Amino acid sequence: MRSLLNNRISNYQSLVAVLIVLLSMGKISAAELPSFADLVEQNAPTIVEIQTSRSVAARAPIGDQELEDLLRRLNPGEEPDLNIEGIPEMRQRGAVGSGFIISEDGYVITNNHVVAGADEIQVHLNDRRVFDAEIIGLDEPSDLALLKVSAGDLPYVSFGDSDSIRVGDWVLAIGSPFGLEFSAAAGIVSAQGRSVPGRSSYNYMSFIQTDVAINQGNSGGPLFNLEGEVIGINSQILSSTGGSNGISFSIPSNVALNVVNQLRETGRVERGLLGVRMRAVDYALAEIFGMERPRGAFVDEVQPDSPASRSDIRNEDIILRFMDHDIEDYTDLPFFVGQYRPGTLAEVEVFRDGEFITLTVELGSSPTNAVASVSREPDRDRHNPLGFRVTALSEETRQVAGISGVRITEMGEGPGRDAGLAEGDVIVALNRREVTSAEEFTEIADQLPESGFVPIRIIREGQGTTMALELSP
């Protein structure tokens, strides 16, 4: 906690020092410094705190060595069963996050990671009212969630144009850092179009970077401009300590509105797919291919039978424009493609053999579109011994992502959740047997032992890992 406070103090001291220098140089006057008081007073009623919980089975302490030794002596040759029978499930408190109301009839935006996996969500309003919330839709690639509370005549925010902000503009965040509800923090826009490595194999986000003091609990809260309009949704930070280091990332409001409108209409988000593997155009590539300066997305490989291959995009093309969007860096391309739905006829400008060529591509469906829909938890029975259900990967997903397996679409209580599996994970092997279809998964699951540990290998956000499932009768 001391280090967190020191980081925060350091950030504010730096900001104050800069302002003092500018005042002493006559560059600004005190009257020109912004006051956020009216903005906070006007928008505070639209901010909510979100608390989540889920049911967990009561268990004996796994680390209780004496209990384990006793059970081994009483039952030689058998692994001790530390499950406590006959005790009701317990409530486990989950994440505390922030959110904000976007309509008078109770729609609320927050982050996906705040509410994913919760079976009870409570929304705390600024006036101390508390409502149970229903999940309308979740979208992991954008880290957004749309909730609904049963209330009317609620205050709600206004959205601004995130494309109009500039580096250096003042911004304000309101949320509940570390549970300190409805706290305000100010800063400036540090950069735009940021891509945060490691989030996903399909990078569909271009963040607003700020130096606002964002901490645990701010996730899902709004980022306001000086006009009191929401131009971002606070999502994550880069930090070596777990607290604010002055580098935070917000989802642009224009992207969020596209996601939220789709979630409100259908409960899911669909994104287009081009089907290319690409990299940055550096000075060497620009010189080799006769470009005036490095820019665009260099096509390393066109995926077989993809929308790109069917439209005559070729290996070593340099994509410079997609629809009305210039592609300055290769990370721009998946972000812009993801703003359009499958089936869209998109114009793509490429640089090839010294010429500018315009092609028309009918966008395919991104593998991220196979996101779990919100539904009732599955019953746990012999045909579903792991507590979750799966669906087959689409042929396009297999080709583009280069994997075979099944995707978890519904997660209930059971060994899967206890092991840390989540909806959207792709299972490629179970009990050291390769999984290539839903039928094969069911067959393997039916042959699992009644108790003990079995390995399960998954792909999550493009990374493979093996986890242990603990089975019990």
Image (tube, rainbow, N blue to C red):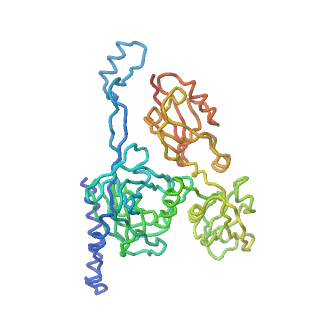
Choose between 109 and 11: the one closer to the eye.
109
Q: Compared with residue 2, is residue 222 higher up or lower down, i.e. above or below?
A: below
Identify the residue at image location x=25%, y=82%: 30
In this rendered view, identify the residue nearer to me: 171 or 213: 171
Position of 140 with respect to 64 (left or right) is: right
Task: Please say if 317 is above or below 59.
Answer: below
Q: Nearer the viewer, residue 246 or 408?
A: 408
| Residue 353, quarter of the rendered image | bottom right
Which residue is painted at 28% across and 76% down in the image? 35
Whole-percent x, y for residue 70 in the image: 32, 17
Q: Quadrant of the C terminus?
A: top left
State left or right for residue 270 relative to residue 61: right
Can you give x and y, in whole percent of width and height, for residue 216 in the image?
A: 33, 54
Residue furthest to the bottom in view is: 26
In this rendered view, identify the residue nearer to me: 306 or 383: 383
Which residue occupies 29% across, 73% down? 36
Q: Is residue 441 left or right of residue 208?
A: right
Vertical placement of 375 versus 282: above or below? above
Residue 313, percent across and down? 72, 63
Residue at 61 percent of width and 73 percent of height: 324
Q: How many marks?
A: 0
Q: Is residue 71 above or below residue 376?
A: above
Q: Is residue 439 left or right of residue 161?
A: right
| Residue 291 in picture, x, y percent from top left | 67, 74
